[in-house]
């Protein structure tokens, strides 16, 4: 799968900051991971979902402390706007993705 965001079109001064690059990598991995959930067994899938729901907000919080809330929330919003990757219909991918990006944005805002 390709990166869901065209980062070349992003015009933001913090876009190349290492914290934003780490956040982008975490969001991209989460997006791709959600797309692969349908291929996993129940317990393994549950562990991956739990990791996504904690790791992405943690990286978002750390990034907000380094570059500011606005830049981090903007990056999260770009990923959220892409939508949910295709996955097995039995997996609530939209719910999981929405939870991941909303929790990440909340974690970034909580660093004020």
Image (cartoon, rainbow, N blue to C red):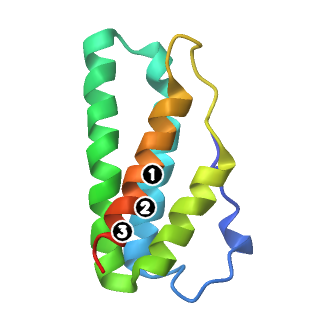
Which residue is the site of mark 1? 102
Measuring from the top left, give residue 32's x and y in whole percent. Answer: 51, 38
Left or right: 83 with respect to 9?
left
Residue drawn 46% across and 72% down? Answer: 72
Q: Quadrant of residue 88?
A: top right
Measuring from the top left, give residue 58's x and y in whole percent. Answer: 26, 58
What's the mark number on residue 105? 2
Q: Secondary structure at mark 3?
A: helix
Left or right: 60 with respect to 6?
left
Q: Secondary structure at mark 1?
A: helix
Asked if marks 1 and 2 touch (Cβ < 8 Å), the reply is yes
Residue drawn 67% across and 49% down? Answer: 82
Measuring from the top left, give residue 83's x and y in whole percent. Answer: 65, 42
> Looking at the picture, does residue 79 appear above or below residue 11?
above
Asked if marks 2 and 3 touch (Cβ < 8 Å), the reply is yes
Which residue is the site of mark 3? 108
Count neighbours of disc 1 (C-alpha within 10 A) and say few if under 14, some if 14 to 19, many if 20 or more.
some
Residue drawn 39% across and 83% down? Answer: 68
Q: Is residue 35 among the parts visible in the rendering?
A: no
Count neighbours of disc 3 (C-alpha within 10 A) and say few if under 14, some if 14 to 19, many if 20 or more.
many
The residues tagged by marks 2 and 3 sit, at their Cα atoms, a distance apart of: 5 Å
Quarter of the image that includes the N terminus: top right
Q: Secondary structure at mark 2?
A: helix
Q: Is residue 13 among the parts visible in the rendering?
A: yes
- Sequence-first disc among 1 and 3: 1
């Amino acid at each position: 799968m390709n990166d869901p965001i065209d980062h070349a079109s992003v015009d933001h001064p913090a876009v190349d900051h290492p914290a934003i690059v780490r956040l982008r990598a975490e969001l991209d991995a989460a997006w791709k991971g959600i797309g692969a959930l349908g291929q996993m067994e129940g317990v393994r899938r549950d562990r991956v979902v739990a990791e996504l729901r904690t790791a992405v907000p943690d990286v978002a919080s750390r990034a907000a402390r380094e570059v500011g809330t606005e830049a981090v929330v903007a990056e999260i919003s770009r990923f959220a706007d892409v939508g949910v990757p295709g996955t097995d219909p039995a997996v609530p991918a939209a719910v999981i993705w929405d939870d991941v990006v909303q929790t990440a944005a909340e974690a970034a805002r909580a660093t004020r």
